Structures are given as C-alpha cells and as structure tokens.
Image: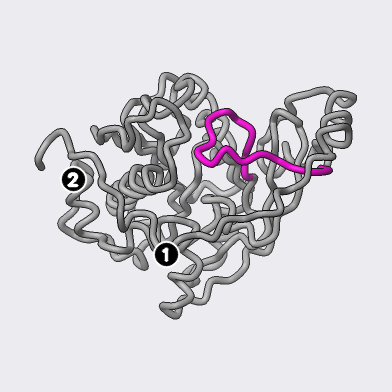
Amino acid sequence: MLAFITTLRHPRNSADYGRVEALLQDTLRSVSRQSCDDHLIIIVGNRLPAFELPPRAVFVAVDFPPPSTHNGPRTGPASVIWDKGTKNAIGLVAAREYAPDHVMFVDADDFVHRDIAAFVAAHPGAPGWVSTRGWIYSRRRNAYALRRNFYRYCGTSFIIPWSAYEVPPELTVTSGQRAIADAFGERLERSLEHGFAYDWWRDRGRALEPLPFPGAVYHVDTGENHSGNILFGPALPYREHLRHDYGLEPSKGTAATLWSALGPASFTRWPAIRLRQPKSFLESFSPPVDPVTR
C-alpha cells in the first residue's frame, strides 16, 4: 500500500485560510482519483478542514504553535521546514498502524498522477522512486511547462519505503515538536525536506529510480505558496491530459488561456540569479516552544 501524506500550515501563517483549504480540497480530489485502491491519504494539521474528507483519507490533529510570528505565507524557509517537517513526521507515525509499503509526501496544493498507486503496487519491495520530470502549473495563467530535476523544485517528488524513514518507536501522534526533532535528529531536515532528500538517500546507498512518467504538477501562483514562485516565460496552454492524468480543472477559457500562455506574460523570463541552498536551514533556527510539555 502507498500512503500519501500531506500537511496544512498553521492558520495564522496564511493570507486566506479558506483559500488554503480550497487548495487542499483540489489536491485531495486529485489524489483520490487513483486508478488503484491500494492507497491511504493522511492529512496533518491544526484545524480539521471544513469540507468532508474523501474516502481513504484520515485527519490527524496537532496543536503545534505557529512557526513564525509573521501573519502570512512567506515566513522564510526555516519556519516552513520546521512546521512541515514535524507534521510530516507525525504523518509517518500515523501511517505506522496501516503498515504501508511506501510513502509519498504531497504538498497541499499540488496534483498527482492517477497511476502512482498502481505503479507502486506493481513493484513491491522497490527501493523507491523520484520524480525527475514534472509539470509546473500556474492557475493564474492556466498554463504549464515541463521541469527537469523536478525534485529540486517541488515537495511532491519522492516515493520511499516507510521502513527507510526509521520512524522512532517512542513517538506517537501526540508527540510535541521538540520531541519529534530530538528523535529524528538531522533526518527531520535531510530526509523529509525535498531540497535535501535526493542527496541524503543517494549518499546512504538508496538507489532511487526515476519515475517513468511525470508524477506531479507543482502548483504556483496561488497566493499561498511559501516560496512565492511563479511560472516564468512562454508556457503550454492548458491541455486535457491535465484533467485526465491529474484531475486538474482549467481556470480560463481557450482564448484567455492562449493570451496568458503566449501573450505579454510569456516575455518574463526566469531570473538569471539563483541563490545557493545553504547546508542547513534549521541549524540556526530557534523554533517556538510547544504550548504543552508532552
């Protein structure tokens, strides 16, 4: 079985939490369209979503404090990695009782290919996969583009055996963030954060196979992206395979889509300067104190 794990940010760290939940609902619709029933969806967050969860989805509530005093989504990478990493860890703990073979972390605004669970089920015992190719999609433009080295951009990229995460047995779904961080150690950042994960698994001898199809759609221009990334340059107008493969509905009509994909917006190019990723974001981060000592 494949366990999809996704997390919700703290309501205070959003521009519009209703929008955050709407994005999650679209993501869950996408994940729930799997062509194989051998899967589970685990959502970890501070607040139960206002909408009804789909079948095979379970919600795990946490009372973690906001990772930043900033009221909005752009809190900086360290805060995001701390909040998301500890919630992903809770997702791994929650998955333990379902005994999944593999786990895939999914960002709560992305879309996943409908055949991922079937592909994983057909390859029991595999060491895992990585999405080396994937789509980046802008709902504002209703346009998209192929991205290589996709796992460097998007958190919805890795399918790893649950056992490889070596979930500390002392942790429970009620564990606090400090207990989680102490139990996972450097793995909290190195194996649960997509920007470091590929190198982490490679350096430990885990040979991840490239997923043989684009596994996910990285959704940008939402107004709630932590990174603030947008789709630059000429792009492909929305095509029906996005609906069929990923459950992604169009946001514009044909004429407006062509204008957004190939009109003036397409003249904006990718920035020439790309900042180097530091060796660690959490090394100098001072997280907030858990409100309850566990």
Q: Which residues are magenta?
A: 218-235
The answer to whether residue 171 is left or right of residue 206 is: left
Image: 176 above or below 162 = above
Classed neighbour count for the residue bearing mark 1: other residues with Cα under 10 Å, few (<14), some (14–19), many (≥20): few
Q: Which residue is mark 2?
A: 175
Question: In what element is the residue under mark 2?
Answer: loop
Question: In what element is the residue under mark 1?
Answer: loop
- The quarter of the image holding the N terminus is bottom left
Residue in view at x 76 percent, y 31 percent: 141
Question: How far across and how far down the image is residue 273, in percent?
Answer: 66, 54
- The quarter of the image holding the C terminus is top left
Outermost residue on the left side: it is 293
Q: Residue 230: within the magenta?
A: yes
Q: Nearer the viewer, residue 149 or 75?
A: 75
Residue in view at x 40 percent, y 24 percent: 49
Classed neighbour count for the residue bearing mark 2: other residues with Cα under 10 Å, few (<14), some (14–19), many (≥20): many
The answer to whether residue 253 is left or right of residue 272 is: right
In three-dimensional space, the C-alpha distance between marks 1 and 2, rounded to whole angstroms, equals 27 Å
Circle 2: residue type: Ser
Main SS, magenta region, reads loop
Q: Which residue is mark 1?
A: 279
Circle 1: residue type: Lys
